[in-house]
Structures are given as structure tokens and as C-alpha cells.
Image (cartoon, grey):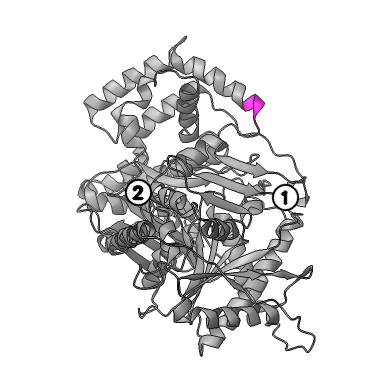
Amino acid sequence: MPILEKETPKGRGDSKVLPKVPVPPLKQTLDLYLKCVQHLVKEEQFKRTKAIVEKFGAPGGAGEFLQKKLQERRDKTTNWVYNYWLEDMYLNNRLALPVNSSPVMVFPKQTFSDRKDAIRFAAHLITGVLEYKALIDARALPVDFARGQLAGTPLCMKQYYRLFTSYRLPGLKRDTLKVQMNAASSEPEHIIVACKNQFFVLDVVAKNKQLNEMEILSQLEKIVKMAENAEERLPPFGILTSDGRTEWAQARDALTKDPTNRASLALIESCVCVLCLDEPSGLEPNDTNRALLMLHGGGREKNGANRWYDKPMQFVVGMDGVCGVVCEHSPFEGIVLVQCSEYLMKYITGSPSRLVRSSSITELPPPRRLLWKCNPHIQGLLAASADRLQRLVHNLDMDAYKFKVYGKEFIKKQKMSPDAYIQVALQLAFYRCTGRLVSTYESASIRRFEEGRVDNIRSATPEALAFVKSMTEEKAALTDSEKMKRLWDAINAQTNYTIAAITGMAIDNHLLGLREIAKELNMDKPEIFCDETYLASNQFILSTSQVPTTVEMFCCYGPVVPNGYGACYNPQADHILFCVSSFRESTETSSAVFVKALEEGLLEIRDLCNRSGAAASKLAGSGQLHKAGK
């Protein structure tokens, strides 16, 4: 099994039994699949695809048989798609976690007067983490309810229970997500502190009592002092976790031949979280540089080895005030990371630091440096991992851009969904850059269902293509009201697809399930899944996600394919923050070019809305509105 989970009894966060993820009707999925791809491929190719799909969906065909098997699986499991999706999205993926997989949350830039000030902030942050973890362990977090489309539905809370209890173990062919879901674990609780590429164990429980903030600060000060001892410094073993998953699995196998290394790995793999105390990077702390430093640490020259990427929650506190969280994505979605980060930011700003020197401060055993045994073979692996991380650092092209002209309030005044509006603007920007639309991924939460994770909103709709053409090559031939109609068609198509996705009726999880059940039954792979259209439709050249925050911080991630863009956006009342990423090695992409096209498109759509609004007001004033079909 790819996921090893030990469950706890249900608590407050599970009080309501949620429905199971549905299996959509086969014909509905196949028809929608054809609609999603028709305008993205050449006519001849589409004809072939249509024939293949019709054969698959015909009475008595392979599709009908697999659909029946999928429905049987639904009856027997809590969530029929969960393991299929987890393996396909994460555990089978062999790419390195930094940039390719792990998203980050960038905290507001902190101003530290000195090193001690930064360590005080870290102690305060960790105290907040332990407080949040206690709420999760007690199952005392209030249940989340859906916002946006179909607001008010209760959501599955299980992702929260994996925040501090998971570990992604590298495998030669497939990783394993290990989850210890027993809140009343008798294991001693500890965090791992990374400092100057060394790793230390900080026990947060001593004599059956959790350390207070003063005690955590005292332990962190000792760790910083121990890390400064150059004579005891060991090679930067954390760099191995930044490598491709197969390479790291091979390196881990080499490490575990020695009992010292096995003991160190066991302590890291069972920790609550990792705290990375980073050295100053020397870079200007603008949004783009802070995003880059969170994503890859700046490589071997900076803090790239001061990480342990397999651990889902890595809190970074830079001595230069660059702070945030690096998140291993397989146990939970972005919204869980947001909720945790917002709790911590509010804790830091809202609760005074509890650094009270007390005469009764417990005499604590000193933190322990993790020891490693190295040999020439492992030394070679460390050097190779460092080189590959360096290439990733040089390759990533990031542009964190704040669009300040308007935000979601303007969009809401147009009676449009801000998310749908921004997705249409992203399609326009991509079309401007390339002259075409491509398969686009927008994550849609399916937490309305038991153990729900995500499905995909395919934003490159035929209606979006019609609209972007009206703003580009057909611009002169169409009136504003025709363009406005196409904009509304695109917004409505996007909104309708979003509702289908969040209610379990999108196509991606369903097609994945049909494909995987055929594999499980040792059938020949159905032709629909070998077809070039299907393969291309799963190459997400545009990978997008809305990650809104109520606190000043932002999320970002890298592209998911070599010639693609990652586009994370955070709509606020009067501005929208975009984090656009691409790879420099691709001749097809440029983050700066995409951002410029995005800005132009957002301004043009606003101008179109304003002109149409003014025209409508004029017609209303002259009594012509009814005749104009408004």
C-alpha cells in the first residue's frame, strides 16, 4: 500500500458523516472529455480520438465493464479515488520535491535587530505550532465550511490530522506516505532544527511537560552555539532530500547500512516538524527573491542543504527576516497550509511573546546533534545531489507580481466570480504569448466528500477560446457587446465546470479511476489511454491555483512540466498577487513576458467591462435598455 495510516477514533472535526465521492455517469464524462479537447487538437487528430472514445463507451465495451468495477470499488471503499490519485499525483512522481512539487507559503518580511531577535521569533513561532498541533490532536479545530461556489457545505477535516504526523519516504519506483494518526501517541515529541546544514533534536516534551517558550528559546540558543562549532560539523546530508526521488531512495539505502545513520533518519522521520534557521542570503528581500529562497533555499551556496524536504512542514526563519513554510504536498492541500499559516501569523502578532525568565526553569538536557557516518560513495552522492539542486536553482524563473489597478471588489461589482474572471484572464495571457490554448489545471477541492482531496477544473474551455480570440485577432470585427457576451459565456463555462468539479462530476479523477482499475485487473491498456490526445491533455502546460489569504502572505510553486507555467494567485479587495514560474531552459516560456501579457489582459477586460457598463447605463437612461436585449 502506498499510504500507511494508523487511524484514531472520530473526534469533533469528524462529527458529521460526509457522503462518498460519486462515480459520474460514463457517457457524461466521455462527452465532457471530448468537449474539453476538441478545440485544443487538430481536426484529424480529434476525429481519431472521437472514434476511440465512442468505441470505449459503446454498449458492451471496455468502458462499461470498467465503470461497473469502479462502482463496486466505490461501494467497498471510503473514497474510491484517494489512493489512485495520491499515487498518480505524487508518489509515482520521480521529480525532485523542491520547485517541482512542494509549494511554499512566504510570510511577511520580518525585521530582526540581531541574531538573538530572530531566534526569539523562532521560539515564538514554534510555541504557536505546538498550540495548533494540540488543537489538532484534541480534534478541537472547528469544522471548515465551503466558501465561494456552493458555500456552507461542511468539509472533510482529515487533511489537518496529517500536518504534523506524516512523512514521505522515498522509494526506488514509488514513494510511501507514512502517517501516524494516533493522537495519543506515547512517542516522545521532538522537532528537528536545521542550522548551518546540521540537524539537531529538540525535545518539546520533558518530564511529561511541554516546554514553554522560554525553554524553547534556551534550547534554540544552545543549538545555534553548537552549530557554530566548525570542528564538529558534518557533511550537509539534507541536500540528498532535494534530489530526484529515485536518487534519494538509492542514497537512503546507502545511508541505512550504518546504524548511526539509521538512528538519525528515524529521529527525523518521526519528528513533529522541521525548523530551518537560515543564514542571511545576501539577496534583496523583495517578493520574488523571498519566493525563490523558500522554494529552493538558494542552492548549495546559500540554504539549499539546510532542509529536509520529505517532512511536510518545514518552518524557515532566516536571520535576514526571510521566513515562511515549505510544504511536502502529498498529505494535504494548500487550504490546510493557509489555515495553519494564518493561525501562526495571528498568534505571532496577536499573542505577546511569553519570554519570562523564571527561577523555576526546568534544567533541560541539552539538544542533540544528529550524527552521520560518511564514506567516499556517500560523499559522491552528496556532491551529485548538490549539483542537481544548483541546476534547478539556475533554471527556475520566478516573477511575484502585484497587480495594483483593481482587485476582487471590482470583479464582484461586475456580478462575476473573481476566480472565474482571473482564470479567463490567464487564458488570455497564455494565448497572447503563444497563439493557442493548452490543457490547463486548476485545483478544485472535493473536501465535501469523505477523504476528499482535489479534482481538476479544465479552464481552457471552448468559450474561453472564443473570448480570447475576440480580444486578439477578431478584435476589430466585433462590437463591445459581442465581446461582452463572449466574456460572460467564458465566465459561465468556467463557473459551471467549477461546480461540476467540486461536486465530484469532473472528468480527470473518473478517467484516472477507469485507467487504474484496468491496470489492477491486468487488462491491456484501453486505447483511449494510449491516444495522443489523452496523453497531451494530461500535460498541464498551465498549472494554476487560487490560494487566497486573509493575512499578508502568499503561496507559490514551480511549473509541473518543463515547458510550462505555474500560476498561483491571491485575489485581495484592491489588488491581485500573482506568482508566475517557468523554467529558463525552455525556449517557449518567460515569466516576465507572461506577467506583461497578464497585466495587459486584466486592463483590457476591465476597460471592456467599464465601456459596457457605461453603455448599459446610457441605454437605461434613454429607455433603450429593453430594446437592446439587456
Residue identifier under label 1: 182
Find residue 38 and report its image quarter.
top left
Q: Is residue 444 left or right of residue 543?
A: right
- Residue 321, given in percent of the width and then of the height, sits at 48, 80
Pinpoint residue 370: horizontal percent, then vertical percent. Answer: 55, 67
Specify whether residue 379 is painted magenta.
no
Magenta residues span 74-78
Name the outermost residue toward the top.
60
Answer above or below: position of 509 versus 108: above
Q: Residue 589 or 34: which is nearer the viewer?
A: 589
Instruction: Choose between 627 and 223: the one closer to the eye.
Output: 223
**In the shown orientation, is residue 154 left or right of residue 422?**
right
Amino acid type, mark 1: Asn
Of residues 373 and 280, the one drawn nearer to the viewer in this rendering: 373
Left or right, 325 with respect to 529, comes to right
The amino acid type found where label 2 is placed reads Leu
Is residue 551 positioned above or below 168 on the image? below
Instruction: Name the residue carrying label 2.
Output: 542
Q: Residue at x 60, y 25 (%)?
A: 73
